[in-house]
Image: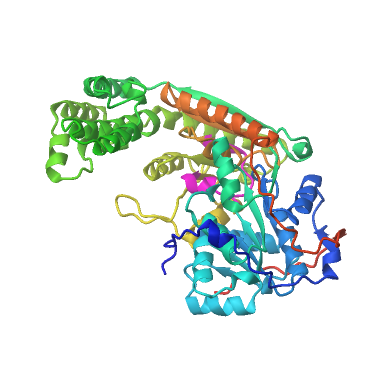
Amino acid sequence: MQEGSVSEHYPDSFVNQAPPMKLNPDLLAARRWIYPRNQQRRDYQFNIVKRSLFENTLVALPTGLGKTFIAGVVMLNFYTWFPEGKVIFVAPTKPLVAQQIEACHKSCGIPGSHAAELTGLVPHAVRSRAWQEKRVFFMTPQTLMNDLKSDNCDPRDIVLIVIDEAHKGTGDYAYAQIVRYMMAKNPHFRVLALTATPGGKPEAVQAIVDALHISHIEIRDERSLDLAPYLHKKHVKQHIIEMSDDVKKIQDMLSEIMKPMIQKLTNARLLHGNPNPTCLHPFSCQKALGALHGQRGGSPWAFPLLSKLGKLARIMGYLVRLSVLPAASGCSTRQTSTKAQADRFAKDPKLQAIITELDKMKTPSGELPPHPKMDKLRMLLIEHFAQKGFDAESNGAEGGDLDSDSRVMVFTSFRHTVDLIVNMLNKDQPLIRAVPFIGQGIDKKGKKGYGQKEQLEVIKRFKAGEFNVLVSTSIGEEGLDIGEVDMIACYDAQKTPIRMLQRVGRTGRKRDGYVHVLLSEEREERNWEKADDNYKDVQHFIIKAEQLELYEDVERLIPDYIRPECVEMEMEIEEYVRED
């Protein structure tokens, strides 16, 4: 079975037939629970661990506040209490799995030699042997699901599943499938779900609770009193970027093409929302096309109109939010269902006029001028590193080390913009040393992304100071440990609070951090405001937790008469050594 191919549902009637618990705890070991003192004790971590031992807990903590340590301590205790049990840590990507296995074993005290790192790249026979020989497993969820279904792993042997990036655990994603399968085959296991951002809406949080069988929630945000000693200030500044005259001219020409199309579709009640061409999202056209397909008879004239408008909306988005170059590319060649449609699109006289105008904008070397955001981003980074250098020099550092301890992350939504930003910033070497950080997929031009080893190598070199700017797509928003970052620059705004928070959470961990958000007029201003409002609403909802429906059928797993006492002790650390 291919990784990621699992898609099964288990009826409630089947889930309710609970088999007896196969494994028994070591009753002597269960009289205590261990809290490692290899690092300074933090009360919020201690309290969360204590609850997570006996409840299926959703832990929502801001990035950088020790979710992995909490997981490691809970894993250590289940590893100790159940000598024959299997302890599982699942993470959504292979690089995350690789990082978490190292991070856990550097802090929790479980011997690294007792752990295995299993992903879909590991042959079935090797995984089968690991299940026989090891007790602690770090895996992608698809691989765990495949091993459960192929009898590589007996579900009755699993006593704990830690779920990283738990906000992904809804619907038919593999996390939800695992919990459903386990509840059917062996409901006697603990769930610990970890996230920095539990959901963009209250319903999304309830969906995680439902899918992962959560009975208790531990949530903290940056206003939580017990986090105050460990948090540093984040200085967030919005920069409203005015478009250049050249960009405005192209924008106006595009708007003139789009306005009558929007008007016609709006009058026919086929298109809804903001009629401003600069704010039209291509998804609105896609959604309207989907609705039109579902209508009998329908309006045949609207299909080509919506299709063309969607392409123009995408070009407008590139122009306003990202860069002139992809907008120019969109005007000249667009992917359409047939060559004839592509030719008609590209040969539209009004589009030809835009292409002519774009040609006039080119420099003598044939390059299009940078987007106004590019200039602003460059100036922000030059000012940042120059100031850091001045501060270091004032403190007695030698010239060669002026900016060695400062790191910056730049976020953008599209891979082609990553390349444009990196090329632009590296013109200011050695002050700015930028490197791209992208996911593993193949882009539309067939260019491969970064595999697991390449991603981890880039992070290693970034942490070491070889590069001081990481220009990242959404891969950098996920739970990978990037190290300490002084400044975040968001090249485009996200209206989803999860993505906004993951970006902002990358700074302000060990010292004050700075967040610069570059917003195009109107379109992105609203995105940012909406994300901020949504985030506040969700945090308020979860912290009150009055409306959340939690599970009440979660068992302790150790006998009721045993009340484990905490023993705080320094643990001997045996790190995980990866086999080549």
Q: Any magenta on residue 474?
A: yes
Q: Quadrant of the N terminus?
A: bottom left
Q: Quadrant of residue 104?
A: bottom right
Q: Is residue 193 above or below residue 471?
A: below
Residue 20, image x and y in percent? 67, 69
User: Taking 406 as reference, is 449 left or right?
Assistant: left
Instruction: Identify the residue shown where x is 67% and y is 64%.
Output: 188
Query: Picture quarter containing residue 336?
Result: top left
Q: Position of residue 390 (x, y in %)?
A: 64, 34
Give the residue displayed 59% in from the left and 77% down from the top. 130
User: What is the total number of numbered labels drawn onto the structure image?
Assistant: 0
**Image coordinates for residue 571, horizontal then vertical, percent:** 81, 65
- Please state which of residues 361 and 565 is positioned toward the viewer in this rendering: 565
Estimate the x, y position of residue 566 in percent, counting from the top left.
86, 58
Give the side of residue 42 with respect to residue 286, left or right.
right
Instruction: Determine which quarter of the picture holds residue 289.
Output: top left
In the rendered image, residue 179 lying in the magenta stretch gets the answer no
Viewer-side residue, 279 vs 230: 279
Magenta residues, as a range? 471-489
Q: Is 185 placed above or below 367 here?
A: below
Quadrant position of the C terminus in the picture: bottom right
Against 196, is 492 above or below?
A: above
Q: Is residue 345 visible?
A: yes
Q: Answer whether residue 107 is visible to the viewer in this image.
A: no
Quick check: 104 left or right of 353? right
The image's colouring method is rainbow
